[in-house]
Structure formats: structure tokens, C-alpha cells
Image (tube, rainbow, N blue to C red):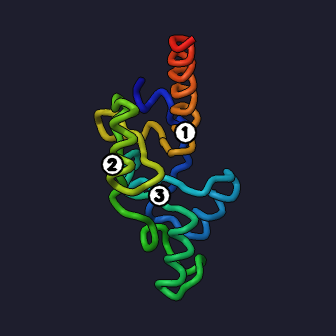
Amino acid sequence: MSILDCCAERVVAVNEAESLATAVGEMHRQNVGAVVVVGSGPMASRPVGILTDRDVLKGELRLKKDLFALSVQEVMTRDPVTLPEDCEIGTGIGQLRLAGVRRAPVVNRQGDLVGLVCIDDLIPLIASELSALAAVVHRRAA
């Protein structure tokens, strides 16, 4: 199974040049704790960063400014780990683990954003697979 099969295809994305207040407002409206940041112009469909609620808080404290005086690019996490849409789930989990992140944009061969995968999407899937495996083991033991 590929990572595209289990990622969220409805991705909330904001432009890197947007005000932080606008991005936080969108996060609130969409009820999400993270958005994918895309570039401008020809990079408008390419992930260039991730903005999490934690990035907002840390950025405000580090820069000693409030969200109305900051832009997304000032506080976002730059150059996020991205996963190709045909990446196998096990490989994707390994990439998330190596990078120490909970989520990653999923991109097509051109590098355009097609989804977002997070561990919250993967845990139920892996739990279901483990349950099926346990049933096989239990059946063989009986």
C-alpha cells in the first residue's frame, strides 16, 4: 500500500508570504494544528515549509512579536520532509522517524502537493494490520 492511499488528500495550504495572523485564522477555521506552506509564483503548488501551532508559539517568543506583526515564512519550519506519492507505508514511516517529525507533505513526481500524511493517519492503519496478523497467529495456534 502506498502512502497516498492513507494520507489526507484535503490539505490546508497557505502561501509563505501570508501574514501569520491570516494563516492562524485559517488553521482555526479548518480546525487543524498544521498547514503546508507553499511557495509563490511557479512554486505555488510546491511545499516549502510546514507551519504548526507550535511553530507559531515558538516564533512569537523567539522574535518577541505577536502574530499580527509576523509572516508565515518568519516562523515556519523550512524544507519539510516530503514523501513521494508512490512511497510504501513502511518507507514513509521510516522517513518520519529518521526526521523526527509527525507529518509530511505527499508530493507527485513533479513535486506538487497532493496530500499530507501524519502519524494520526498511520496508527489506526497499522493497528488494523497488527490485529489481522494477530488473528492469523491465534487461528494457527488453535
Which is more N-terminal, label 2 or label 3? Answer: 3
The label nearer to you, 1 versus 3, is: 1
Q: Residue 42 carries which label?
A: 2
Residue at 38%, 48% in the rendered image: 96
Residue 13, x across and y down, in percent? 51, 50
Amino acid type indicated by mark 3 = Asn
Q: How many labels does the image show?
A: 3
Q: Is residue 140 left or right of residue 96?
A: right
Q: What element carries label 1?
A: helix
Q: What element carries label 2?
A: helix
Vertical order, 74 against 12 (above or below): below
Q: Distance between the residues labelled 1 and 3?
A: 29 Å
Determine whether 27 is above or below 136 in the image.
below
Front residue of 141 and 94: 141
Q: Residue at x 54, y 68 (%)?
A: 54
> Which sits earlier in the primary sequence, circle 2 or circle 1?
2
Q: Distance between the residues labelled 2 and 1?
A: 35 Å
Identified by mark 1, the residue type is Ile
**Where does label 1 land, which residue?**
123
Q: Name the residue located 40 percent from the left edge and 45 percent from the top edge.
A: 45
Q: What's the CA distance linking mark 3 and mark 2?
A: 12 Å
Which residue matches tag 3? 15
Specify the amino acid type for callout 2.
Answer: Pro
